[in-house]
Every structure is written in C-alpha cells, then in structure tokens.
Image (cartoon, coloured by chain):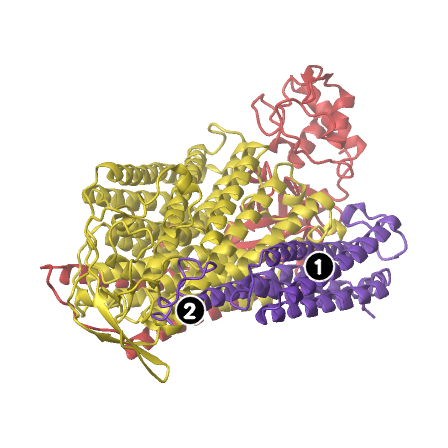
Amino acid sequence: MATEVSSNLKKVQVRRFKPKEDPEQNYLNAEKGIWSWLTTVDHKRIGVMYLASVTFFFFVGGILALLLRTELWTPAKTFIEANTYNQLFTLHGAIMVFLFLVPAIPTALGNFFLPIQLGAKDVAFPKLNLMSYYLYLTGACIVVFAMISGGVDTGWTFYTPYSTSSSGAITIIVSGIFVIGFSSILTGVNFITTIHKMRAPGMSWGKISLFNWSLYATSIIQILATPVLAITLALVAMERILGIGIFDPALGGDPVLFEHFFWFYSHPAVYIMIVPGFGVVSEVITTFSRKHIFGYWAIALSSLAIAFISFLVWGHHMFVSGQSTLAGMVFSFLTFLVGIPTGIKMFNWTATLYKGSIKLQSPLLFIFGFFFLFLIGGFTGIVLATIALDVHLHDTYYIVAHFHFVMVGGMVMALLAGIHYWWPKMFGRMYNETLAKIACITIFIGFNVTFLPQFVMGAQGMPRRYYNYIEQFQIFHQISTIGSYILGLGFLLVFIYLVKSLFTGEKAPVNPWGSRGLEWQVSSPPPQHNFNHTPVIVHGPYDYHQPMDEFQLGLAESGNGHGDHADIKIDRDEPNREL
Amino acid sequence: MELLNDLLLPPAKSTLAQQTDTLFWFVHLSSLVITVGLLAAVVYFVIKYRRKSEDEVTPLITHNNKLEVTWSVIPLILVLICFGWGYKIYMEQEIAPPDSYEIQVTARQWLWQFSYENGATTTGELHVPAGRPVKLVMSSQDVIHSFYVPAFRLKQDVVPGRYTEMWFNAPKPGESIIFCTEYCGTAHSDMMGTVIVHEEDEFEQWLAKNAGGASKPADLPPAEWGKQLAQQYACATCHSTDGSRLVGPSWKGIFGHEVQLSDGSTVVVDENYIRESILEPNAKVVQGFPPVMNTYKGTLNNEQINAIIEYIKTLK
Amino acid sequence: MANDSTATSQPKFLQHHFVDAEQQFDSAKMGMWVFLVTEILFFGGLFAAYIVYRAWYPDLFVEASIELNTVLGTINTLVLIGSSFTVAMAIRAAQLNQQKKIVINLAITIFLACVFMVIKYFEWTHKFHLGIYPGQFYTFEGIPHPKASVFFSLYFLMTGLHGIHVLVGIGLMIWLLKRTFNGEFSSKYFTPIEITGLYWHLVDIIWIFLFPLFYLIE
C-alpha cells in the first residue's frame, strides 16, 4: 500500500466492499444460547436487549395509563380507590419517564447504530455498556419492587415535603431511579468518547450522521444533568432516613429549593427524550425523499444549542411556585429561545422535502405523524412559556396534553419511525407494510382523540392529578378515555406484526430503502463486528447525488477506524472491484 | 369566535382575565397559522414530489443562508412579542395595588381556611367585596398546595414555611370555583372551595355578622352547630353522611357501634373515640382505611368538638 | 496509524475494537475525563445546597465551624496532597517501566488514603460523642443557633460522600497493585494507572474545596 504523508493529510488506497446479501453469519447467530446474550459486550445485542426491556416497560406504563383513563370515566369513583389512583399515576409517570422515555432511543437504537454509522466495530467501552444495561435492569427491578411493597403516591416529581412525609416506599423508588441515573450517565460517557475517538478514516465531523449528532447532544445533557438528579434524590432519601432538613421548612429548609434541584435535571431530561427523536427524523426524511438534508450544520448545531439552553430554563416549571418575578422573567425569556433552534429544525426538514423523490412508506408516515403532533406540542409550549398564560394553565390538563403531545406525539412517533426504518437492518426481516400503515393511522387518530380534549378541559381549568372532578368535564374525560383505548390498540398492533415478522417476515435485502447511510452498507443483519474491513468514508450520509458504490469503500486489511485520521485523502485503485 | 371562546375558556370574572384571554388567542391563532402553513407545505411537497420511478435523481440543495436566517429571525420576533406581552400582564398579576383588602389564607390537607381582619374565619368559602382589589396572603400548614381560580386566570402555590401572595379584583357579584392544583395527597381532588363575591355593603354585613368566629351562636342547638362546623371544616371531603365509602369511614350510623381497627382489635365508637380521632387521628385507624387524616388539635376547640360529636350522634 | 498497526502483531492488552494502543489509551483517558465532569456535577448539587444555606444563615456557619478541628483538617489536607503527588509518581514510574517504583508509590498512596480515613473516623466519632449527629438525631447544645443541625447535616453528607470516594480509590489502587505484581503494566500499557490517577486527583481537589468551606470560616 502506498501511503504518503503531506502535512497532516494522509493518502490511502481503497477498494469497494460490496455487502453480502443474505450472509450465513451475523451478530444474531454468531454465538448461541441465552448465556451468550446475557454476557455479550456486542453493542448490537445490548441494543436489542434494551429494545426488549423498554418495550416491556412501555406496555406496563401503558396499561397503567389505561387503568387511569378508565377510572376517569365518571366524576367520582369508577372502580378504584383514591389512594390506588394516586399510586397508579405516580407509577405511570415514573415508569414512562425513567424506564422508557429517557433510555428508549439512545440505548436501543443508539447503541445499535451509533458505532455502525461511525464505521466502528463497537462503542469505546463495551463492558461499561453491558454494565449500563444491568444497572438499568437493577434500577427497574427496584422501581417495580417499590410498586409492590407499599406503592408510592407522590407523583413522579417527588415534591417535598409531601414526599418526605408521605407513607409508602419512596426511599426504595428513589434509590431505584438513582441506579438508573448511573446507567444513563455511563451511556452518555460511552457515546461521547465513541464519537470523539472511534470514527472511521474519512468520517470528519461534517460527515457524521445527524442521528449521531443528536445522540452527541443528548449525551452531553445526560452527563451534565443526571448527576444533579442523583444527588437530589439521594437528599430526599437522606431527608426521610436522617431528617437532614435541607428541604423541610420545619428544620430551616426550603421545599422550593427541591423544585429548583429537581427541574435542573428534569427539564434538560425532556430534551434527553426528544433530541434523539429529532435525529431519527433527519435520517428517515432524507432516505425516503432520496435527497440531501437541507441545512446539515443548522440541524446539527441546533441540537447542541438546545442542549445548552436546556440547562437555563428549568424555572419555567416554577412560575407560580413563589420564585421571584425577576427569575420568572428570565426563565420565560430563555424558554422562548429554546423554541428557535427547534423551529429551525422543523423548517429545515420541510425544506428537505422540496424537489425530493418522496415515497410514502410507513417510517415516513410515522414521521409525518410526528410533524403534526410535535408542531402542536411545540406551539403549546410557546403558549406555556408566555408567563401570564402559564399562571392560568400550569398544573392543569393543558400541561398534561402538552407534554403528551411532545413526548408521545413527538418522541414515541419518532421512535416508531426509527424502529420501522431500521427493523430490516436489525433483524433481517421485513414487516407487513399495509399493517404498519394501518397501525400508524390508528395511533394517530387514537392519540388525537385522547389528548385534544385534554387541551380544552385544561384551558377550562381542570387540574391534573385529580381523582374526582366536577361534572362539567365529564364529556371531555369520556372522549379522552375512548381515544386511549384506540391508542392502546394501535400500539398492540405494531407489537404483533413486528414480532410476527421475526418468524414469518420476508428476508430483508441489504438496503431496502436505497439509503446512503453507512449502516445500510453492511449486511442485514450486520456481521458480528459490523465491518470485516476498515470502512473509508468519502461522502456524507446524505450525498444522494453520488453513486451507491462510492459509499462502500474500505481498506483491504483488517483493523478499524480512527478518529484522529478523519482528515484523510482517498486514492482509489480499481474503484469498481468488488470483494 | 364567541362560541370558541366559551368552549375553551371559563367565564372571565376578574379585571385581568380579559387581557389574559386576548393574549391566549393571539398566541394560539398565530401558532395555528404557522402550523397550517408548514403542514400545507409538507402535504404539497409529498404530492408534488412523490416518487415516480426508482431511478429518480434529486438535485443537490445543501443550504440557503437567506432562507435559514429568515426562518430563524421571524419566529424570534414573534416569540419576543409573546414574551413582552406575557411579561407585562404577569407584572400586573403579581403586584397588588396598595389599597388592596387583605385576607389570610391557610391551606392544609385538604381544606382552605380564610381569616378576615375582624377575626371572622371561614373554611372552603372565600367571601370578598366586588370591585375592590383583594390581596390573599397565603401559607400552608403541611405540604405544598396551590390556590387556583380558573375564572380569574390566577394561580399561586401555597408553600409551608413562607408566605406567598396573590391579588385579584372581581367586578361583579357571583360565585367561582377554587381548585387545589398542586398534588397534596389522598383527597387532593376534593380540596376545592368557592369564591363568593358580594356587593360592597352586603360584604360588610356578612363580615360584621361573622366577627369573632369560633363560639357557638346562641340560638343554635349543638347538633345543628356541629353540622355547620362539619361543613365548614370540610369533614365531608372524606366522611360521608349517607353511608357511602369515601377516603374515611362514613359517619352514618357509626356512633355506638363497634368497629374493627387496622391492628385487629375492636373499639366502640363513643365520645372518647371520636374525640381522640379528631385530635390524634392515626392512633386508632378503622380497618380498610388509609392513615392519612391530619390532627385538628389547635384548629377545633373543645366546644366545637363536642358539637361535632352531637352531630354524629344524630346520623342514624 | 490505521494501516501500520497490522504490520506489528496485536498486543495482548489491545481490545478487538480498537485500531491500536494509542486509540485505546486516548479513549480511556477521554472517558475518564468525561466521567470526572459528571462527578463534579454530582458534588455540585451539594455545593449548591451549601451556598444557599450559607447565604441564608451566614452567622450559623461561623458559629458551627468552630466545632470542627482545624488542625486535623489541615493534616488531612496535607496527607491528600501528598497522596496526589505519589500517585503521579506511580504514573511516571510506569512510563519509565520501573516496576518496583510503581509498587512503592501505589503503596504509599494507599497508606496515605488510609491515614486520611482514620483521621476522618476520629473526627466523626468525636462529634457523635458530643451528640452532633446529622439531621433529626442532633442533640448537641453547644451552639445557640436553632438551625445548627443543618450545618452538620451538610458537613456529614459532603465529607461522607467524599469519604466514599476515598474508599473507592483505595479499592482501585489495591486492584492496580495486584495487577502490577502480575506484571501487566509497562511503558507500553499503563492506562489503568493513568486514569485511576486522574480520579484520585479529583478526589483530592474536592477535598481542597471542602476544607476551607467547612473548617476555615471566619
């Protein structure tokens, strides 16, 4: 191999490596037995295990939600007691937030695709990655144990002094979330290091996929915000065990201080949930419109901007908590600023469609669902950032509807789009496209029927976390309950046809959508170590004006990418020779 | 528009509510315009540029600085308008006029108590004069609560260990509902109340009649007074009088009967047990009910407790 | 160097997904730095609580600080700074391939860390003896301030959390010592010593903040 060093640029010769259709060996069958799964350090298998776990907890949280909605069918007791109701909404919130929304996209799809999209063989610390998974699982078990042993009725926000005085397994559940927090931190550490140090030759910062940019921004939030949540929850536990009094007014403490601590994590946390979803949107939109992303840097940097500003807006959860009017003003102003990078993304995605070659397949359909729902979620966020309006709408069903539009309408729709988009790559099987479209439309309708009425009753003054309510709201609650059943059916349908595809689905080709992304240049499912060659990157993942074979280049010898050599010059000998 | 306003917003019954509503509609309608615009563009592109053949090549359009600056700056201007406008109204909501009529509010699980300048106290009912700014000085005895009157578009957390304030001016007599909007435990959703707005002179009369507060009106039999007290102190939030099951045991027919306690022992419901249950609620809890009641020590005096016991005796 | 590494055979310590030892070392070091950032924020929560309470009750902090033994605190500070020095010496020894010096320096570091913990133990037990317990168990009457227990709650929490970090550090260094005896480290591979050293410096720096904030309030 002729290599030649000129200043800091290095020249390498590359050949084309065409991925094999239907290879005999892949990561799923390279090793066998349950033990090989439980002890695996393969990022793909860990991703699959996360996917199974978050799906399980999504359905647990979902069933709790259906129980809550059923109870709200009548203004007084329908079938459960007030205390049970309070425990159910606490667990619905805690499970959905900490066991599903926060980990879902980064740990399941991120773990699977981040190294492949970078051209690496694994994340930087594979063992740490496995440890993160077991920390998550341990934390999840503790949370479930808390649910069985006495229950928790504080709401997922654990506001003091209620959480320090209420009976129930609060110390247990906060220690569970503490453990999950460390899982989240370690995943963040792993991803940041991987993106910095594990990129393949030619994979410069300007060629990283926007999904990876979004994971990068997410990881930054994870490592900076989660430790504060951990220490806050530790303080709540200490308050209960030792009575240290930091949040207890009777001992000289201040409950509003807890709110500050809690939202310092929990506001950035909503961006941990949604920003990876933005990444999925960028991938799916470009693939199904076969077009270069519009405003690559605007989208990449707006993720970082969101990550940065998200740390400065926590006080908008506390406009009526008794904080000073000056603080209220500053937090309101900064909150509006977060809206700008988010808006930029929406405009750029729409512009990407312009003059594209658009094929409306199920992943793209889910993305359009995301568009509609996230726009409503985002704009109602602007309403809530308007401080005088928040005074009226705070802690009503308007808030409930707003964050469900952002979280379910935004993040879950993006997650479903991502799962449908990458399913053929992950498992090597195609799902039933017709059923996927039906499910998407069912979920979309069910979602709107559930949550649009909640905006109306919220603006009318219906407070959240109410077991009983006054009769004028009954009609809205009943429509909402019916919608939740439709929504539940939609999710169940997705689960059924996806699982079915694993057994009876058609074998998936290497690149069913014709994407230029690096993950589509390996077999379906990918080989055990992702690449048998060192991939070399000459074009970005959205360069649809370049022919496909230029995305399949690599070095002949074994070994792997190296971030420090990303500024590489590529020389092609026999560019069309296949190996 | 009128119809839409009535669907989305409760009636506006304070001087500031109208302003808040105008802003509410401004933000919603301008958001709606952008949403519809964007979605229309998406739908148009999807139809116009649908894939006609698998070999289609798309043009390379990477970015356009002018466009990107435009769609960053226009939203920025719009949100700055929302910010400024929202802040202006917020300052009016926050700063009470100096001549406001002051009422003390105490929140506890799960009732609202109001005390007035002349010693009058009420529970669950806030009486205020019409057309005059009223300032509420609020604090909590236990956990965080939040005082919310949808018709006034106002809300303020009520926090233990500190005082928070809010003010309003209700121009017309009438009644509006009060909700607690910060989750505070088992009967959070029953922690409601009513704002009753009187004409100025009617309010003065009401105030004079209720001066002093905590002693029995001379002409009332104890059981009747007990019934009033039970209403005032929101006992019915948790204890029904018709035998139906709420957070706590129903009072109907409970007096003189034996009840099973959560530790397995039994006790006869007599004067002593009821008294103890009011002052130390969690000492002997009836089986099947959560130990969530708070003490009324310092809230109810002996005479009042006796009256409530007399009232419970009448519920056969 | 992507295509030079194949010429030499893969060393035993090199994990399969790295190109070469340099990449592995860089990654490990960067990972540790990122982790240390999370540690700073972890303590940051407690420091924020400290700042808030000190702003609310400045005189309490002056009064209560007198109960803390400045002499023992100073000795502990010197002990930890010394251990930071010896851990740096251990890294230097590894870079120079001096096996014996690695062992000696690690052993001194472990010893100093233990001295720190022993002194802490005596400080804490002395306070317990006086009835200075955290939170609701506080029974000491020597400080006339009604919120005195809050100061000591913070003291116990922050020095306790720091102490846990010291214990973790001792554990890590015993593990390093064992691996040194196995001859796993050399000038080619000393990543675990390097990153444990980084961690130990952080533990040291946090104490350097804790010491004046609790002991030296005038």
Quadrant location, the C terminus of chain B: top right
In front of the other: A254 or C195:
C195
Q: Is residue A488 above or below residue A197?
A: above
Shown colour of chain A: yellow
Instruction: Name the residue: 23% across, 65% down.
Output: A551
Q: How many marks?
A: 2
In front of the other: C167 or B181:
C167
**Identity of the amino acid at label 1?**
Ile
Instruction: Name the residue: 48% across, 71% down.
Output: B84
How many angstroms separate mark 2 from mark 1 (CA)? 58 Å
Shown colour of chain C: purple
Q: Which residue is mark 2?
A: B79
The red-tinted chain is B
Disc 2 secondary structure class: helix
- Residue B279 in the image: x percent, y percent? 76, 32
10 Å crowding of disc 1: few (<14), some (14-19), many (20+): many
Q: Is residue B39 above or below residue A57?
A: below
- Residue B73 in the image: x percent, y percent? 37, 75
10 Å crowding of disc 2: few (<14), some (14-19), many (20+): many
- Residue A159 in the image: x percent, y percent? 60, 48
Residue A46 in view: yes
Instruction: Name the residue: 52% across, 60% down.
Output: A223
Q: Nearer the viewer, mark 2 or mark 1?
A: 1
**Identity of the amino acid at label 2?**
Val
Q: Which residue is mark 1?
A: C110
Residue B6 in view: no
Disc 1 secondary structure class: helix
Q: Disc 2 sits on a residue from what chain?
A: B
**Is residue A409 shown left or right of residue B49?**
right
**Is residue B189 shown left or right of residue B268?**
left
Q: Is residue B238 above or below residue A436?
A: above
